[in-house]
Amino acid sequence: MAEKIVTQGLNAFFGDVHAVKNVDLRIPEKAITAIIGPSGCGKSTLIRCMNRMHEVVRGARVEGKVLLDGKDIYNPMTDAVQVRTRVGMVFQKPNPFPTMSVYDNVVAGLRLNGEKDWKKLDSAVEQSLRLAALWDEVKTQLDASGVSLSGGQQQRLCIARALAVKPEVLLLDEPCSALDPIATAKIEDLLFDLKDRYTIVIVTHNMQQAARVSDFTAFMYLGELIEFGATKKIFENPEKELTEKYITGRFG
Amino acid sequence: MNAYERRRLKNLLASGLAFACVVLAVVPLVYILIEVVRIGAPAIDWEFLTSRTKGTGEPGEGIGNAILGTLLLVLYASAIGLPVGIFTGIYVSEFGNNSIGTTIRFFNDVLANFPSIVVGLLAYSLVVDYLDVGFSLIAGAFALSIIMIPIVANTTEEALRMVPNSLREGALALGVPRRRAVMRIMLVNAKAGVVTGALLAVARIAGETAPLILTAFYSNYWSASPFEPIASLPQTIFRNYNSPSDELLQQAWGAALVLITIVLAINISVRLLMRSRLRKSKAVRRTWLKRLSLKA
Protein backbone atom coordinates (compact mmCIF):
# COMPACT_ATOMS: atom_id res chain seq x y z
CA MET A 1 0.00 0.00 0.00
CA ALA A 2 1.27 3.44 -0.93
CA GLU A 3 2.31 5.83 1.78
CA LYS A 4 0.73 9.26 1.95
CA ILE A 5 2.64 10.79 4.84
CA VAL A 6 6.05 9.72 6.08
CA THR A 7 7.72 11.25 9.09
CA GLN A 8 11.48 10.93 9.32
CA GLY A 9 13.28 11.61 12.57
CA LEU A 10 10.47 13.94 13.62
CA ASN A 11 10.98 15.88 16.84
CA ALA A 12 8.58 18.47 18.17
CA PHE A 13 9.13 20.88 21.03
CA PHE A 14 7.16 23.36 23.11
CA GLY A 15 9.92 25.61 24.38
CA ASP A 16 12.11 23.20 26.34
CA VAL A 17 9.54 20.42 26.44
CA HIS A 18 10.36 17.64 24.02
CA ALA A 19 6.87 16.45 23.07
CA VAL A 20 7.56 14.18 20.11
CA LYS A 21 10.80 12.20 20.05
CA ASN A 22 12.39 10.96 16.88
CA VAL A 23 9.26 9.51 15.30
CA ASP A 24 9.44 7.56 12.05
CA LEU A 25 5.94 6.78 10.94
CA ARG A 26 4.49 5.78 7.57
CA ILE A 27 0.83 6.65 7.12
CA PRO A 28 -0.78 4.47 4.42
CA GLU A 29 -2.88 6.12 1.73
CA LYS A 30 -6.68 5.83 1.72
CA ALA A 31 -6.89 4.02 5.01
CA ILE A 32 -7.62 4.97 8.60
CA THR A 33 -4.65 5.15 10.92
CA ALA A 34 -5.32 5.52 14.62
CA ILE A 35 -2.82 6.99 17.03
CA ILE A 36 -3.36 5.83 20.59
CA GLY A 37 -1.56 6.34 23.85
CA PRO A 38 -2.03 7.84 27.29
CA SER A 39 -2.70 11.56 27.81
CA GLY A 40 0.26 13.79 27.15
CA CYS A 41 2.16 11.23 25.08
CA GLY A 42 2.42 13.53 22.08
CA LYS A 43 -0.33 12.09 19.88
CA SER A 44 -1.96 15.43 19.15
CA THR A 45 1.37 17.15 18.71
CA LEU A 46 2.39 14.49 16.22
CA ILE A 47 -0.61 15.01 13.94
CA ARG A 48 -0.36 18.78 14.31
CA CYS A 49 3.11 18.43 12.78
CA MET A 50 1.51 16.82 9.74
CA ASN A 51 -0.25 19.99 8.58
CA ARG A 52 2.11 22.50 10.13
CA MET A 53 -0.36 23.50 12.83
CA HIS A 54 2.21 22.79 15.54
CA GLU A 55 4.15 25.93 14.73
CA VAL A 56 1.05 28.08 15.33
CA VAL A 57 1.60 27.68 19.08
CA ARG A 58 3.98 30.11 20.69
CA GLY A 59 7.43 28.69 21.36
CA ALA A 60 6.76 25.54 19.34
CA ARG A 61 9.29 24.15 16.90
CA VAL A 62 9.80 21.10 14.75
CA GLU A 63 12.88 19.18 13.65
CA GLY A 64 13.06 16.38 11.10
CA LYS A 65 11.02 15.72 8.01
CA VAL A 66 7.40 15.15 7.17
CA LEU A 67 6.99 13.92 3.61
CA LEU A 68 3.63 14.41 1.95
CA ASP A 69 3.61 12.39 -1.26
CA GLY A 70 7.39 12.27 -0.94
CA LYS A 71 7.88 16.04 -0.58
CA ASP A 72 9.02 17.55 2.71
CA ILE A 73 6.39 19.96 4.03
CA TYR A 74 9.02 21.56 6.25
CA ASN A 75 11.12 22.56 3.26
CA PRO A 76 11.65 26.33 3.59
CA MET A 77 10.16 26.80 0.11
CA THR A 78 6.90 25.10 1.12
CA ASP A 79 3.93 27.30 1.93
CA ALA A 80 2.30 26.18 5.19
CA VAL A 81 -1.04 27.57 3.99
CA GLN A 82 -0.83 25.37 0.90
CA VAL A 83 -0.05 22.32 3.05
CA ARG A 84 -3.12 22.96 5.19
CA THR A 85 -5.45 22.98 2.19
CA ARG A 86 -4.14 19.51 1.31
CA VAL A 87 -4.14 18.20 4.87
CA GLY A 88 -7.33 19.16 6.68
CA MET A 89 -7.89 19.01 10.40
CA VAL A 90 -10.79 18.49 12.80
CA PHE A 91 -10.29 19.41 16.42
CA GLN A 92 -11.22 17.92 19.74
CA LYS A 93 -13.95 20.42 20.51
CA PRO A 94 -16.32 21.30 17.66
CA ASN A 95 -15.38 24.84 16.58
CA PRO A 96 -17.87 26.14 14.02
CA PHE A 97 -17.53 29.88 13.44
CA PRO A 98 -20.23 31.35 15.69
CA THR A 99 -21.02 34.36 13.54
CA MET A 100 -21.66 32.23 10.46
CA SER A 101 -24.62 30.19 9.30
CA VAL A 102 -24.35 26.46 8.59
CA TYR A 103 -23.95 27.29 4.91
CA ASP A 104 -21.24 29.89 5.53
CA ASN A 105 -19.39 27.56 7.87
CA VAL A 106 -19.16 24.80 5.28
CA VAL A 107 -17.74 27.08 2.60
CA ALA A 108 -15.70 29.26 4.98
CA GLY A 109 -12.43 27.84 3.66
CA LEU A 110 -13.45 28.41 0.05
CA ARG A 111 -14.82 31.90 0.57
CA LEU A 112 -11.93 33.06 2.70
CA ASN A 113 -9.68 31.94 -0.10
CA GLY A 114 -11.60 34.04 -2.60
CA GLU A 115 -14.22 31.75 -4.14
CA LYS A 116 -17.19 33.94 -5.08
CA ASP A 117 -19.16 31.84 -7.55
CA TRP A 118 -22.44 31.05 -5.75
CA LYS A 119 -23.11 28.03 -7.94
CA LYS A 120 -19.81 26.46 -6.95
CA LEU A 121 -20.40 27.32 -3.31
CA ASP A 122 -23.92 25.90 -3.36
CA SER A 123 -22.74 22.62 -4.81
CA ALA A 124 -19.78 22.48 -2.41
CA VAL A 125 -22.18 22.92 0.52
CA GLU A 126 -24.42 20.07 -0.56
CA GLN A 127 -21.55 17.80 -1.51
CA SER A 128 -19.60 18.35 1.70
CA LEU A 129 -22.61 18.03 3.95
CA ARG A 130 -23.60 14.81 2.20
CA LEU A 131 -20.07 13.47 2.66
CA ALA A 132 -20.25 14.39 6.32
CA ALA A 133 -23.63 12.63 6.61
CA LEU A 134 -25.22 15.84 7.79
CA TRP A 135 -27.15 17.00 4.72
CA ASP A 136 -30.47 15.37 5.58
CA GLU A 137 -30.42 16.80 9.07
CA VAL A 138 -29.59 20.39 8.17
CA LYS A 139 -30.75 20.93 4.60
CA THR A 140 -33.76 22.92 5.76
CA GLN A 141 -31.74 25.06 8.16
CA LEU A 142 -28.69 26.05 6.16
CA ASP A 143 -29.35 29.62 7.22
CA ALA A 144 -29.31 28.81 10.96
CA SER A 145 -26.29 29.73 13.02
CA GLY A 146 -23.58 27.06 13.04
CA VAL A 147 -23.56 26.95 16.81
CA SER A 148 -27.29 26.25 17.01
CA LEU A 149 -26.69 22.63 16.03
CA SER A 150 -26.12 19.84 18.56
CA GLY A 151 -22.56 18.93 19.55
CA GLY A 152 -22.43 15.90 17.28
CA GLN A 153 -23.86 17.87 14.37
CA GLN A 154 -21.37 20.66 15.02
CA GLN A 155 -18.51 18.19 14.81
CA ARG A 156 -19.83 16.79 11.53
CA LEU A 157 -20.23 20.37 10.35
CA CYS A 158 -16.54 20.86 11.10
CA ILE A 159 -15.75 17.70 9.14
CA ALA A 160 -17.84 19.04 6.23
CA ARG A 161 -15.99 22.35 6.50
CA ALA A 162 -12.66 20.54 6.32
CA LEU A 163 -13.83 18.40 3.37
CA ALA A 164 -15.11 21.42 1.42
CA VAL A 165 -11.57 22.59 0.66
CA LYS A 166 -10.97 19.19 -0.94
CA PRO A 167 -8.08 17.92 1.13
CA GLU A 168 -6.26 14.66 0.47
CA VAL A 169 -5.67 13.89 4.12
CA LEU A 170 -7.98 14.40 7.08
CA LEU A 171 -6.46 14.65 10.53
CA LEU A 172 -8.83 14.19 13.45
CA ASP A 173 -7.69 15.12 16.93
CA GLU A 174 -9.90 13.16 19.34
CA PRO A 175 -12.99 14.20 17.38
CA CYS A 176 -15.42 12.29 19.59
CA SER A 177 -14.14 13.07 23.05
CA ALA A 178 -16.79 15.74 23.59
CA LEU A 179 -19.62 13.66 22.12
CA ASP A 180 -22.12 11.12 23.40
CA PRO A 181 -22.05 7.48 22.19
CA ILE A 182 -24.70 7.96 19.50
CA ALA A 183 -22.97 10.99 18.00
CA THR A 184 -19.69 9.08 18.26
CA ALA A 185 -21.12 6.14 16.34
CA LYS A 186 -22.30 8.48 13.58
CA ILE A 187 -18.82 9.94 13.20
CA GLU A 188 -17.26 6.49 13.18
CA ASP A 189 -19.63 5.35 10.42
CA LEU A 190 -18.80 8.50 8.54
CA LEU A 191 -15.05 7.87 8.78
CA PHE A 192 -15.60 4.38 7.46
CA ASP A 193 -17.39 5.82 4.42
CA LEU A 194 -14.71 8.42 3.84
CA LYS A 195 -11.70 6.16 3.81
CA ASP A 196 -12.13 5.20 0.14
CA ARG A 197 -11.37 8.78 -0.81
CA TYR A 198 -9.21 10.20 1.94
CA THR A 199 -6.22 9.29 4.00
CA ILE A 200 -7.45 9.57 7.56
CA VAL A 201 -5.42 9.88 10.74
CA ILE A 202 -7.35 9.84 13.99
CA VAL A 203 -5.99 10.50 17.45
CA THR A 204 -8.04 8.84 20.14
CA HIS A 205 -8.02 8.11 23.84
CA ASN A 206 -10.54 5.42 23.25
CA MET A 207 -8.96 2.09 22.39
CA GLN A 208 -12.27 0.52 21.42
CA GLN A 209 -12.72 3.29 18.92
CA ALA A 210 -9.28 2.68 17.46
CA ALA A 211 -10.05 -1.04 17.23
CA ARG A 212 -13.43 -0.36 15.58
CA VAL A 213 -12.55 2.17 12.93
CA SER A 214 -8.88 1.92 12.05
CA ASP A 215 -6.91 -0.22 9.65
CA PHE A 216 -3.58 0.65 11.21
CA THR A 217 -2.67 1.69 14.72
CA ALA A 218 0.29 3.53 16.15
CA PHE A 219 0.96 3.39 19.85
CA MET A 220 2.83 6.27 21.43
CA TYR A 221 4.24 6.60 24.90
CA LEU A 222 6.11 9.57 26.41
CA GLY A 223 6.64 11.16 23.01
CA GLU A 224 8.04 8.04 21.37
CA LEU A 225 6.43 5.82 18.80
CA ILE A 226 6.46 2.42 20.46
CA GLU A 227 4.77 0.29 17.87
CA PHE A 228 2.98 0.64 14.55
CA GLY A 229 1.16 -2.01 12.57
CA ALA A 230 -2.15 -3.37 11.35
CA THR A 231 -4.80 -2.68 13.96
CA LYS A 232 -5.66 -6.36 14.29
CA LYS A 233 -2.06 -7.22 15.02
CA ILE A 234 -1.55 -4.39 17.51
CA PHE A 235 -4.63 -5.33 19.46
CA GLU A 236 -4.33 -9.09 19.29
CA ASN A 237 -0.66 -9.82 19.13
CA PRO A 238 1.49 -6.78 19.82
CA GLU A 239 5.25 -7.17 19.63
CA LYS A 240 6.20 -4.85 22.45
CA GLU A 241 5.37 -5.59 26.04
CA LEU A 242 4.54 -1.92 26.67
CA THR A 243 1.90 -1.99 23.94
CA GLU A 244 0.31 -5.08 25.37
CA LYS A 245 0.22 -3.57 28.84
CA TYR A 246 -1.52 -0.46 27.52
CA ILE A 247 -3.99 -2.36 25.36
CA THR A 248 -4.95 -4.63 28.23
CA GLY A 249 -5.44 -1.64 30.48
CA ARG A 250 -2.61 -2.27 32.88
CA PHE A 251 -1.53 1.37 32.71
CA GLY A 252 -2.45 4.60 31.01
CA MET B 1 -24.48 36.95 72.44
CA ASN B 2 -23.98 33.70 70.62
CA ALA B 3 -22.01 33.06 67.44
CA TYR B 4 -25.00 33.43 65.16
CA GLU B 5 -26.00 36.80 66.58
CA ARG B 6 -22.42 38.04 66.31
CA ARG B 7 -22.33 37.01 62.70
CA ARG B 8 -25.63 38.73 61.99
CA LEU B 9 -24.42 41.91 63.59
CA LYS B 10 -21.21 41.87 61.54
CA ASN B 11 -23.20 41.24 58.42
CA LEU B 12 -25.48 44.16 59.20
CA LEU B 13 -22.54 46.47 59.84
CA ALA B 14 -20.73 45.43 56.68
CA SER B 15 -23.72 45.80 54.40
CA GLY B 16 -24.60 49.10 56.04
CA LEU B 17 -21.10 50.38 55.37
CA ALA B 18 -21.22 49.17 51.79
CA PHE B 19 -24.54 50.94 51.25
CA ALA B 20 -23.17 54.17 52.75
CA CYS B 21 -20.30 54.01 50.27
CA VAL B 22 -22.73 53.55 47.41
CA VAL B 23 -24.63 56.64 48.53
CA LEU B 24 -21.37 58.56 48.83
CA ALA B 25 -20.43 57.58 45.30
CA VAL B 26 -23.80 58.23 43.71
CA VAL B 27 -24.78 61.46 45.45
CA PRO B 28 -22.21 63.72 43.72
CA LEU B 29 -23.06 62.19 40.36
CA VAL B 30 -26.79 62.74 40.80
CA TYR B 31 -26.15 66.21 42.21
CA ILE B 32 -24.09 67.20 39.19
CA LEU B 33 -26.70 65.88 36.80
CA ILE B 34 -29.51 67.72 38.60
CA GLU B 35 -27.54 70.97 38.77
CA VAL B 36 -26.56 70.81 35.13
CA VAL B 37 -30.15 70.23 34.06
CA ARG B 38 -31.56 72.81 36.53
CA ILE B 39 -29.26 75.63 35.54
CA GLY B 40 -28.41 74.57 32.02
CA ALA B 41 -31.80 73.61 30.64
CA PRO B 42 -33.32 77.13 30.72
CA ALA B 43 -30.43 78.34 28.58
CA ILE B 44 -31.18 75.90 25.81
CA ASP B 45 -33.38 76.88 22.94
CA TRP B 46 -33.07 76.69 19.19
CA GLU B 47 -31.20 79.96 18.97
CA PHE B 48 -28.73 78.85 21.64
CA LEU B 49 -27.94 75.69 19.72
CA THR B 50 -27.57 77.38 16.35
CA SER B 51 -25.97 80.77 17.04
CA ARG B 52 -22.28 81.29 17.48
CA THR B 53 -20.50 82.30 20.66
CA LYS B 54 -19.55 85.94 21.00
CA GLY B 55 -18.13 86.03 24.48
CA THR B 56 -19.89 89.24 25.39
CA GLY B 57 -22.91 87.99 27.25
CA GLU B 58 -25.38 89.67 24.92
CA PRO B 59 -28.70 88.04 24.18
CA GLY B 60 -28.69 86.06 20.93
CA GLU B 61 -25.49 84.28 21.73
CA GLY B 62 -25.21 80.53 21.41
CA ILE B 63 -22.88 77.60 21.28
CA GLY B 64 -23.55 76.38 17.74
CA ASN B 65 -19.97 76.79 16.64
CA ALA B 66 -18.75 74.94 19.74
CA ILE B 67 -21.07 72.00 19.06
CA LEU B 68 -19.84 71.91 15.47
CA GLY B 69 -16.26 72.24 16.72
CA THR B 70 -16.56 69.35 19.17
CA LEU B 71 -18.16 67.16 16.51
CA LEU B 72 -15.44 68.02 13.99
CA LEU B 73 -12.66 67.48 16.53
CA VAL B 74 -14.10 64.08 17.43
CA LEU B 75 -14.54 63.22 13.75
CA TYR B 76 -10.99 64.16 12.75
CA ALA B 77 -9.47 62.59 15.87
CA SER B 78 -11.40 59.36 15.21
CA ALA B 79 -10.27 59.33 11.60
CA ILE B 80 -6.67 59.21 12.85
CA GLY B 81 -7.08 57.45 16.21
CA LEU B 82 -9.48 54.62 15.40
CA PRO B 83 -7.57 52.96 12.56
CA VAL B 84 -4.21 53.38 14.28
CA GLY B 85 -5.59 52.12 17.59
CA ILE B 86 -7.45 49.17 16.08
CA PHE B 87 -4.49 48.04 14.00
CA THR B 88 -2.16 48.45 16.98
CA GLY B 89 -4.50 46.23 19.00
CA ILE B 90 -4.60 43.67 16.20
CA TYR B 91 -0.83 43.65 15.94
CA VAL B 92 -0.25 43.30 19.68
CA SER B 93 -2.85 40.57 20.06
CA GLU B 94 -2.22 38.51 16.93
CA PHE B 95 1.40 39.14 16.01
CA GLY B 96 2.79 40.63 19.22
CA ASN B 97 4.19 37.53 20.88
CA ASN B 98 7.65 39.05 20.77
CA SER B 99 9.65 41.88 22.26
CA ILE B 100 8.06 44.44 19.92
CA GLY B 101 4.60 43.45 21.12
CA THR B 102 5.67 43.63 24.76
CA THR B 103 7.17 47.07 24.22
CA ILE B 104 4.07 48.39 22.47
CA ARG B 105 1.88 46.98 25.22
CA PHE B 106 4.02 48.72 27.85
CA PHE B 107 3.89 52.10 26.09
CA ASN B 108 0.16 51.72 25.56
CA ASP B 109 -0.38 51.23 29.26
CA VAL B 110 1.79 54.25 30.07
CA LEU B 111 0.14 56.41 27.43
CA ALA B 112 -3.37 55.40 28.54
CA ASN B 113 -2.72 57.00 31.93
CA PHE B 114 -0.78 59.98 30.63
CA PRO B 115 -1.86 63.46 31.79
CA SER B 116 -3.75 64.83 28.82
CA ILE B 117 -2.19 68.29 29.20
CA VAL B 118 1.19 66.70 28.41
CA VAL B 119 -0.29 65.21 25.27
CA GLY B 120 -1.48 68.73 24.48
CA LEU B 121 2.06 70.03 24.96
CA LEU B 122 3.39 67.39 22.58
CA ALA B 123 0.80 68.31 19.95
CA TYR B 124 1.60 71.98 20.48
CA SER B 125 5.33 71.57 20.01
CA LEU B 126 4.96 69.18 17.08
CA VAL B 127 1.98 70.40 15.07
CA VAL B 128 1.39 73.96 16.16
CA ASP B 129 5.00 75.03 16.51
CA TYR B 130 7.37 72.71 14.64
CA LEU B 131 5.15 71.98 11.64
CA ASP B 132 4.02 75.59 11.88
CA VAL B 133 0.33 74.80 11.39
CA GLY B 134 -0.65 77.14 14.20
CA PHE B 135 -3.59 76.75 16.56
CA SER B 136 -5.99 74.67 14.54
CA LEU B 137 -8.65 71.99 14.37
CA ILE B 138 -6.08 69.55 13.02
CA ALA B 139 -3.68 70.17 15.92
CA GLY B 140 -6.51 69.57 18.41
CA ALA B 141 -7.62 66.43 16.60
CA PHE B 142 -4.02 65.20 16.61
CA ALA B 143 -3.79 65.62 20.39
CA LEU B 144 -7.16 63.90 20.92
CA SER B 145 -6.18 61.02 18.64
CA ILE B 146 -3.06 60.43 20.76
CA ILE B 147 -5.35 60.09 23.77
CA MET B 148 -7.62 57.72 21.83
CA ILE B 149 -5.01 55.34 20.47
CA PRO B 150 -4.04 53.51 23.68
CA ILE B 151 -7.69 53.17 24.74
CA VAL B 152 -8.75 51.74 21.41
CA ALA B 153 -5.64 49.55 21.13
CA ASN B 154 -6.13 48.06 24.59
CA THR B 155 -9.82 47.32 24.12
CA THR B 156 -9.20 45.85 20.66
CA GLU B 157 -6.44 43.63 22.03
CA GLU B 158 -8.68 42.59 24.91
CA ALA B 159 -11.58 41.82 22.57
CA LEU B 160 -9.39 39.73 20.27
CA ARG B 161 -8.01 37.80 23.23
CA MET B 162 -11.54 36.93 24.25
CA VAL B 163 -12.10 35.14 20.94
CA PRO B 164 -11.46 31.43 21.57
CA ASN B 165 -8.18 30.17 20.19
CA SER B 166 -10.09 27.28 18.61
CA LEU B 167 -11.57 29.68 16.04
CA ARG B 168 -8.12 30.97 15.11
CA GLU B 169 -6.88 27.40 14.69
CA GLY B 170 -10.05 26.36 12.89
CA ALA B 171 -9.50 29.04 10.28
CA LEU B 172 -5.79 28.36 9.88
CA ALA B 173 -6.42 24.62 9.51
CA LEU B 174 -8.63 25.37 6.50
CA GLY B 175 -5.63 26.77 4.70
CA VAL B 176 -6.63 30.38 5.27
CA PRO B 177 -3.67 32.78 5.35
CA ARG B 178 -3.05 34.26 8.77
CA ARG B 179 -3.86 37.87 7.99
CA ARG B 180 -7.16 36.85 6.40
CA ALA B 181 -8.00 34.63 9.38
CA VAL B 182 -7.39 37.63 11.62
CA MET B 183 -9.40 40.10 9.56
CA ARG B 184 -12.30 37.89 8.56
CA ILE B 185 -12.67 35.50 11.50
CA MET B 186 -11.02 36.98 14.58
CA LEU B 187 -12.04 40.59 14.04
CA VAL B 188 -15.61 39.66 13.14
CA ASN B 189 -15.94 37.66 16.35
CA ALA B 190 -14.40 40.48 18.38
CA LYS B 191 -16.51 43.17 16.71
CA ALA B 192 -18.71 44.03 19.69
CA GLY B 193 -15.69 44.61 21.92
CA VAL B 194 -13.86 46.66 19.32
CA VAL B 195 -16.89 48.86 18.67
CA THR B 196 -17.46 49.36 22.40
CA GLY B 197 -13.85 50.43 22.88
CA ALA B 198 -14.03 52.82 19.95
CA LEU B 199 -17.20 54.49 21.24
CA LEU B 200 -15.88 54.77 24.77
CA ALA B 201 -12.74 56.42 23.43
CA VAL B 202 -14.91 58.85 21.46
CA ALA B 203 -16.89 59.67 24.61
CA ARG B 204 -13.66 60.23 26.51
CA ILE B 205 -12.14 62.68 24.02
CA ALA B 206 -15.39 64.57 23.54
CA GLY B 207 -14.94 65.91 27.08
CA GLU B 208 -11.21 66.62 26.96
CA THR B 209 -10.35 70.25 27.69
CA ALA B 210 -6.71 70.61 28.64
CA PRO B 211 -5.03 69.51 25.41
CA LEU B 212 -7.36 71.71 23.35
CA ILE B 213 -6.22 74.88 25.13
CA LEU B 214 -2.80 74.34 23.61
CA THR B 215 -3.86 73.12 20.20
CA ALA B 216 -7.31 73.92 18.83
CA PHE B 217 -7.40 77.13 20.86
CA TYR B 218 -10.70 78.91 20.48
CA SER B 219 -12.76 80.87 18.04
CA ASN B 220 -15.99 82.82 18.32
CA TYR B 221 -16.66 82.27 14.65
CA TRP B 222 -18.10 79.50 12.56
CA SER B 223 -15.26 77.48 11.14
CA ALA B 224 -14.81 74.06 9.62
CA SER B 225 -11.33 74.59 8.24
CA PRO B 226 -8.78 72.10 9.57
CA PHE B 227 -6.19 74.85 9.73
CA GLU B 228 -8.09 77.47 11.71
CA PRO B 229 -8.59 77.65 15.49
CA ILE B 230 -11.94 76.22 16.48
CA ALA B 231 -14.34 76.33 19.41
CA SER B 232 -15.33 73.27 21.41
CA LEU B 233 -17.87 72.60 24.14
CA PRO B 234 -15.42 71.93 26.99
CA GLN B 235 -13.53 75.11 26.10
CA THR B 236 -16.75 77.13 25.98
CA ILE B 237 -17.62 75.93 29.46
CA PHE B 238 -14.13 76.81 30.71
CA ARG B 239 -14.08 80.28 29.18
CA ASN B 240 -17.61 81.27 30.09
CA TYR B 241 -17.21 80.10 33.63
CA ASN B 242 -14.27 82.43 34.09
CA SER B 243 -16.28 85.43 32.94
CA PRO B 244 -18.14 87.80 35.26
CA SER B 245 -21.38 87.84 33.25
CA ASP B 246 -24.31 85.83 34.57
CA GLU B 247 -25.50 85.36 31.02
CA LEU B 248 -22.23 83.68 30.04
CA LEU B 249 -22.27 81.61 33.21
CA GLN B 250 -25.63 80.21 32.32
CA GLN B 251 -24.40 79.49 28.81
CA ALA B 252 -21.59 77.46 30.35
CA TRP B 253 -24.15 75.30 32.12
CA GLY B 254 -26.12 74.97 28.92
CA ALA B 255 -23.01 73.88 27.07
CA ALA B 256 -22.30 71.36 29.85
CA LEU B 257 -25.76 69.91 29.42
CA VAL B 258 -25.28 69.58 25.67
CA LEU B 259 -21.87 67.95 26.20
CA ILE B 260 -23.26 65.47 28.74
CA THR B 261 -26.10 64.66 26.36
CA ILE B 262 -23.66 63.94 23.53
CA VAL B 263 -21.48 61.71 25.75
CA LEU B 264 -24.56 59.98 27.15
CA ALA B 265 -25.91 59.39 23.64
CA ILE B 266 -22.64 57.70 22.75
CA ASN B 267 -22.79 55.54 25.87
CA ILE B 268 -26.34 54.49 25.19
CA SER B 269 -25.52 53.60 21.60
CA VAL B 270 -22.72 51.39 22.95
CA ARG B 271 -25.22 49.49 25.03
CA LEU B 272 -27.69 49.19 22.19
CA LEU B 273 -24.94 47.86 19.97
CA MET B 274 -24.02 45.28 22.57
CA ARG B 275 -27.60 44.20 22.75
CA SER B 276 -28.04 43.96 19.00
CA ARG B 277 -25.24 41.38 18.98
CA LEU B 278 -27.61 38.97 20.64
CA ARG B 279 -30.12 39.45 17.86
CA LYS B 280 -27.51 38.79 15.25
CA SER B 281 -28.25 35.15 14.56
CA LYS B 282 -31.68 36.30 13.44
CA ALA B 283 -30.09 38.80 11.10
CA VAL B 284 -27.98 36.02 9.65
CA ARG B 285 -31.16 34.04 9.18
CA ARG B 286 -32.93 36.81 7.34
CA THR B 287 -30.18 37.37 4.80
CA TRP B 288 -30.01 33.66 4.11
CA LEU B 289 -33.74 33.26 3.83
CA LYS B 290 -33.68 36.02 1.27
CA ARG B 291 -30.96 34.32 -0.71
CA LEU B 292 -32.60 30.93 -0.52
CA SER B 293 -35.95 32.29 -1.61
CA LEU B 294 -34.29 34.04 -4.54
CA LYS B 295 -32.85 30.72 -5.59
CA ALA B 296 -36.15 28.89 -5.34
Image (cartoon, rainbow, N blue to C red):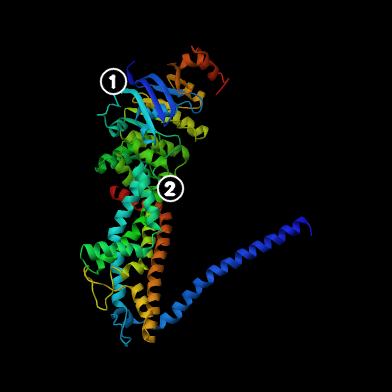
Q: Amino acid at mark 2?
A: Met
Q: Residue B115: x, y in percent? A: 39, 62
* Contact? badges 1 and 2 (CB < 8 Å): no
Residue at the right extreme of this rendering: B1
Q: Residue A35: x, y in percent? A: 44, 23
Residue drawn 25% across the image and 78% down it: B221
As rendered, which of A206 and A220 lies closer to the eye? A220
Q: In the figure, residue B17 lies in which quadrant?
A: bottom right
Is there any visible trace of residue A129 in the rendered image?
A: no
Is there any visible trace of residue B48 in the rendered image?
A: yes
Label 1 sits on residue: A70
* Separation (CA) of disc 1 from disc 2: 40 Å
Name the chain under label 1: A
Looking at the rendered structure, the secondary structure element under dot 2 is helix
Q: Which mark is residue A17?
A: none
Residue drawn 76% across the image and 55% down it: B3
How busy is the neighbourhood of tag 2: few (under 14 within 10 Å), some, or many (20 plus)? Answer: few
Q: Residue A173: x, y in percent? A: 43, 31
How busy is the neighbourhood of tag 1: few (under 14 within 10 Å), some, or many (20 plus)? Answer: few
Label 2 sits on residue: B162
As rendered, which of B242 and B255 lies closer to the eye? B242
Q: Amino acid at mark 1?
A: Gly
Left or right of B102 in this view: A39: right
As rendered, which of A40 and A99 lies closer to the eye? A40
Residue drawn 28% across the image and 69% down it: B216
Q: Is residue A82 above or below residue B44?
A: above
As rendered, which of B73 and B216 lies closer to the eye? B216
Q: Residue B74: x, y in percent? A: 31, 65
Residues marked 1 and 2, same chain: no
Name the chain under label 2: B
Q: Is residue B7 above or below residue A27?
A: below
Looking at the rendered structure, the secondary structure element under dot 1 is loop
